[in-house]
Image: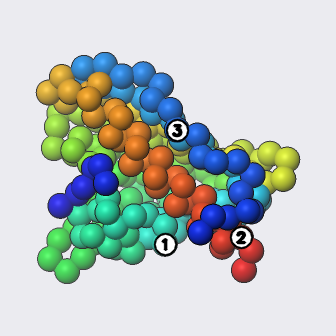
Amino acid sequence: MLKLLSGSLLLIAAPAAAETVSAGPNGFEVRETVNLVVPVPQAWAAFTRVGAWWSGEHSYSGEGANMRLEPRAGGCFCEQWKGGSVEHMRVAVAQPNERIVMTGGLGPLLYEGAAGVMDVQFERIAGGSKVTLVYRAAGFARSNGDKLAPAVDSVLAEQMKRFRAYAAKSGHK
């Protein structure tokens, strides 16, 4: 079942920045930002190989390698394993090397009357790229949005740190 609270690289320009932008009983917004010393096309390619960097601790199967992302409109951010599968999000917008927008409820939001939008933007900066992930969720959420926000922020911050490490490593093969 999905768990919610659960080598140093000198190639990284800056640590991941995590922030709960806003939170209330019926929703929240969190933002994660990482700077990478790889060009945007390599950052994009690394991001879309989600199964290589997503933590198994935050999956249904316990194996991050079971995650996949199809970077096209209608594509699936899904997980499949022997005995089950889950659609975490659906791709709404895919602009390679610029932006990917996905819709769906992550983690416990999947089971609530809440919806989420994850907007991931890729930007060229001096020395590499900047990737900003914003996740907004709102709806019923049993008036628990403000309590869920820190857990979701923590999980997404961990995933972006893992992505940053993977992108840096894959960019220097």
Kindly report which numbered mark, 3 or 1, lies closer to the viewer in this rendering: 3
Q: Quick check: 49 left or right of 126?
A: left
x, y percent for residue 81: 24, 76
Disc assigned to residue 171: 2
**Tag 3: residue type?**
Ala
Q: Quick check: 83 left or right of 107?
A: left
| Mark 2–mark 1 distance (CA, rounded to whole Å) | 14 Å
Residue count near mark 3 (Cα–Cα under 10 Å), binned few <14, some 14–19, many ≥20: many
Residue 98 can be seen, yes or no: no
Disc assigned to residue 52: 1
- For the residue labelled by badge 1, is the local secondary structure a helix, a strand or a loop? helix
Image-quadrant location for residue 76: bottom left
Q: Quick check: 48 left or right of 149?
A: right
Residue in the image at 31% along x and 19% along y: 24
Residue in the image at 45% along x and 29% along y: 20
**Tag 2: residue type?**
Gly
| Contact flag, marks 3 and 2 (Cβ < 8 Å) | no
- For the residue labelled by badge 3, is the local secondary structure a helix, a strand or a loop? strand
Residue that label 3 marks = 18
Residue in the image at 80% along x and 45% along y: 125
Instruction: Pick whichever of labels 2 and 1 is earlier in the sequence.
Output: 1
**139 vs 144, nearest the viewer:** 144
